[in-house]
Image: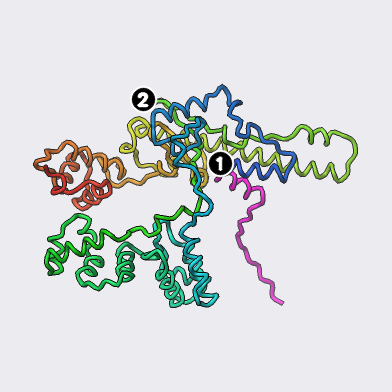
Amino acid sequence: MNLVLNTTQKLLISQKMLQSTTILQMSTAELMDYVNTLTEENPVLEVKNKYDYDQLPADVLRRKIEYLDSSDEQNRLYYRQEKDDEDENDMWKFRQGTEESLAEFIISQINVLKISKKEMAVCGFIAGCLDESGYLRQTDGQIAKSLNITEYEAQKAVGIVQSLEPAGVCARNLSECLALQIQRLGIENDVLNAIVENYLELVGKNQLQLIAKKIKAALEEVSAAVGIIKNLNPKPGSGFISSGSVEYIVPDAVVTGGNGEYAVTLNDSFSAAVNISGFYKDILKGEGEGEAKEFVHSKIRQAQWVVKCISKRRETLYNIISAIVREQTEFFDKGEGYIKPLALNDIAVEAGIHESTVSRTARGKYIQCRHGVYPLNYFFRQAAAEAFGQGVTQEKIQAMIKNLIDKEDKSAPLSDRKIAEELLAMGVGISRRTVAKYRGIMGINGISGRKC
């Protein structure tokens, strides 16, 4: 018998470590829900200040949020307001339960089709994959892999869903969406088909003469075809309610101040501040052993660990947000056009923690400042170019491009090449194509669209 000695490495994660990591990744609202559920399972835990706004310490957080609310109209859409403004809140009232989501409407049609149970299941899966505009973003191969079926079966199911109402649903892109609607209308027009397949971008720019030249058709034919396109629905799923109810973003922290001096306040009014019930502690002090005492002892140990995890989460979150504010001071002073490149490792080093901890903590967290409500991940950016040896973000470059265009002579607008030359003089070297790309992202027209 031969004995073989093998050395292997295994990473073992205990239940406590897993729970600690899970709590670290939770947003404020998720943590509150988690602790509320935990208190039902563990009577030793008590929740303090459970949505008790009257007991906020000196109303500090309330005043800061109200200040940000008054300085930024956008914020009223992102967090629960304590003010009961009926006119503002009418738009947020829940829709009646009789209305359907797009997926529900599609499935109701699938259920009456004469197809096999397997096809019905695949079609139901596809219905659940549709986005709010009614588009299918998965390929046939991805669907086949997810359901362990052939690509042919996936393709067939996609065709079935595309045959349902609303017309154009389940398309992969705008061109296919419009083509499905034209097919449903029974229109056979080569000019129309050519425009939908290849020249929708030119339609958006209203360059009908150029389209006519490219497809060698009369301008009248092109104009008639574009008239049909404009009567089609580019978002067939837009008339249905969202698959989820309206959700408010609860900021995990607020940043107040100005002129380089900022304060970070964690949103503890929504947080799950918990402690251990004194009643159950007294039970342990009593005489006797028994199963009841052992049960209480185990629950107290569990509660102590949860309290420790929440405290550690709070400390870590505060340190990370404070480090971000210090690194992105120019953004908090001036706004979105002034965000600078920032890596996870930069914050990890400054906060004295591991990079993976920064990544986990930032996930799903939001901060509120006078410029709006932003996810923490928004502040981690790669450099899109360099200016005098320092990285410059895409947002900064876009702000520079917009500033140049705002100041240009409207009778002789700057070309993309000229803008690139102006940026180079400022130390930012990007190509003409990159200028055109960023200009398009900002929705700014080219020379012909800006000339007066």
The circle drawn on residue 259 is 2
Q: Position of residue 149 (x, y in %)?
A: 50, 75
Q: Residue furthest right?
A: 288
The span picked out in magenta is 1-26
Quarter of the image that includes the N terminus = bottom right
Residue 77 shows in this picture: yes
Q: Residue at x 45, y 73 (%)?
A: 157
Please give the label number shown on residue 342: none
| 292 relative position to 307: left or right | right
Is 2 included in the stretch rendered in magenta? yes
Q: Nearer the viewer, residue 234 or 311?
A: 234
Residue that mark 1 sits on? 29
For discs 2 and 1, the disc positioned in front in the rendered view: 1
Q: Is residue 345 above or below residue 117?
A: above
Identify whether 301 is placed above or below 187: above
Q: Position of residue 341 (x, y in %)?
A: 35, 42
Q: Label 2, secondary structure: give it.
A: loop
Residue type at tag 1: Ala
| Picture coordinates of residue 411, whole percent (x, y) | 9, 41
Q: CA distance from mark 2 to mark 1?
A: 31 Å
Q: Name the residue rendered at 28%, 49% in the picture.
A: 441
Viewer-closest of 273 and 73? 73
Local secondary structure at mark 1: helix
The residue sitting at 61% across, 30% down in the picture is 52
Q: Residue pushed farthest top?
A: 58
- Viewer can see residue 323: no
> Which amino acid is tagged 2?
Asn
Which quarter of the figure is the C terminus placed in? Answer: top left
Verify CB contact (< 8 Å) between mark 2 and mark 1: no
